[in-house]
């Protein structure tokens, strides 16, 4: 019987409903702020920062990518610390730290300072995303996890839907406090991280037993379901961190994630610049706010695609093709985008790419928690995200270097397509390697 077909009891329905309404929107808000702060540089670049700091495309790409050096170094230790000290304290600490660093971008004055601050932002943010995934997996049984992760992941495309026009609005406040518009934008997107980080300390609960908003019956059901899954996974895999770090399935998932994230950040960091280039390529005229709206266009359909594709995965149970098909679509659409003959056709192809990437990602994250538990889950999820975030550095830097060398974005986008094609092929190979949760529970190993 597939997860989506199992009849739910009243206590199960009410427990999942409360978790969905109480925790998921707040964690998604944190993710929204997180993604906006790390990609704010993409809005600042073509709107004054690149000119003011005299940056080449390669320097801009390096500044965007060096964030991930700091992030990668501390990713696994940070996730293990979250497991030890609790999500409430650790996620609050992460948010306040990155908010303070993000605020300092307001006064950056050189390429070197930009590199240092981007590196420190990565250090401050390290562990947030895998920590959020781990936190939700510690609250939600496997049969409901893909749905919950999809709701959480909606924050990422919506960050651009809402964040791009918001950033453009802030940029248009040129002269506020005597600052250039792009500096006002950095200030405006940093402050919410500090505020929400403080709220996190008081709002989140580490486990069902700490949640005053659950009835005792709901707590008992969640604890029983989660404990049963942990026992089954421990029997099939074990709780040792070292096992996770040497498990072939973890490394296979890491490579798949690398390709998906390469596509995500190539799109995120350079889409505003590509749109700014429409003026030269097609003779169009857009003001800053228009460009912000155009940047947001691909991400609204992506949010719908993510939701409905993940709902299908929740109903059927996540299958490898729920990851492989979107990755395959993205592999061909992203290089094709730059060969379109009009701004409208280009945006259509970019929209298709965004839909593909965001449809794959939440379903991807439903896979690791099928066979990882305890500290192994913390380490394994962090390792996958660490390998993926190497792509976070490589995508903007390689894109910038190749663009400087060729003068065009075509070859960089073919590189994106090739890596997404690799992700698609490896995703289809997951059949038989990572089983459904009920098969794991019976002791079968993928």
Image: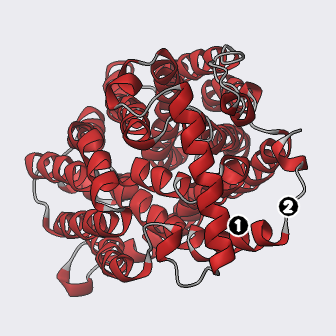
Residue 331: where, in percent of width, then height?
64, 23
Given residues 170 and 99, the one toward you in this image is: 99
Q: Mark 2 points at which residue?
A: 8
Q: Which residue is drawn at 73% across and 43% down?
A: 348
Q: Mark 1 points at which residue?
A: 16
- Helix, strand or loop under label 2: loop
Q: How crowded is mark 2: few (under 14 residues within 10 Å), some or many (20 or more)?
A: few
Q: Is residue 215 left or right of residue 382?
A: right
Mark 1 touches mark 2? (CB < 8 Å): yes
**Is 227 situated above or below 330?**
below
- Quadrant housing the C terminus: top right
Q: In which quarter of the image is residue 364?
A: top right
Given residues 134 and 34, the one toward you in this image is: 134
The nearer-to-camera label among 1 and 2 is: 2
**Is 251 situated above or below 338?**
above
Considering only order in the chain, which callout, 2 or 1, is on the residue closer to the N terminus? 2
Q: Distance between the residues labelled 1 and 2?
A: 10 Å
């Amino acid at each position: 019987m597939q997860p989506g077909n199992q009849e739910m009891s009243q206590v199960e329905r009410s427990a999942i409903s409360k978790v969905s309404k109480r925790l998921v929107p707040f964690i998604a808000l944190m993710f929204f702020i997180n993604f906006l702060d790390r990609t704010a540089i993409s809005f600042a670049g073509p709107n004054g920062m690149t000119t003011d700091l005299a940056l080449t495309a390669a320097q801009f790409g390096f500044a965007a990518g060096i964030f991930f050096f700091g992030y990668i170094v501390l990713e696994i230790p940070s996730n293990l610390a979250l497991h030890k000290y609790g999500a409430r304290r650790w996620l609050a600490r992460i948010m306040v730290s990155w908010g303070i660093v993000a605020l300092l971008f307001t006064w950056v004055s050189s390429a070197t300072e930009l590199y240092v601050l981007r590196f420190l932002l990565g250090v401050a943010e390290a562990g947030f995303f895998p920590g959020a995934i781990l936190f939700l997996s510690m609250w939600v049984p496997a049969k409901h996890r893909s749905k919950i992760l999809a709701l959480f992941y909606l924050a990422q495309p919506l960050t651009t839907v809402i964040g791009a026009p918001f950033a453009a609005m802030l940029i248009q406040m040129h002269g506020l406090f005597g600052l250039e518009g792009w500096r006002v934008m950095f200030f405006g997107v940093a402050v919410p991280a500090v505020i929400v980080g403080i709220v996190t300390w008081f709002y989140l609960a580490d486990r069902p037993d700490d949640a005053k908003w659950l009835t005792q019956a709901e707590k008992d059901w969640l604890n029983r379901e989660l404990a049963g899954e942990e026992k089954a996974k421990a029997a099939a895999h074990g709780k040792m961190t070292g096992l996770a770090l040497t498990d072939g399935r973890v490394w296979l998932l890491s490579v798949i994630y690398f390709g998906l994230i390469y596509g995500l950040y190539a799109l995120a960091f350079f889409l505003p610049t590509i749109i700014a280039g429409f003026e030269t390529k097609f003779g169009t005229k857009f003001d800053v706010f228009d460009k912000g709206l155009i940047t947001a266009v691909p991400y609204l359909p992506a949010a719908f695609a993510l939701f409905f594709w993940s709902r299908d995965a929740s109903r059927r149970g996540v299958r490898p093709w729920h990851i492989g098909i979107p990755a395959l679509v993205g592999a061909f659409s992203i290089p094709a985008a730059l060969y379109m003959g009009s701004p409208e056709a280009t945006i259509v192809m970019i929209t298709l790419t965004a839909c593909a990437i965001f449809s794959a990602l939440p379903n991807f994250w439903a896979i690791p928690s099928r066979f990882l538990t305890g500290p192994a889950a913390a380490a394994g999820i962090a390792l996958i995200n660490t390998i993926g975030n190497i792509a976070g550095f490589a995508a903007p830097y390689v894109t910038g270097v190749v663009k400087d060398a060729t003068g065009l974005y075509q070859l960089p986008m073919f590189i994106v397509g090739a890596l997404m094609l690799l992700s698609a092929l490896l995703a289809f190979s997951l059949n038989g390697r990572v089983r459904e949760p009920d098969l794991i529970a019976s002791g079968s190993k993928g």
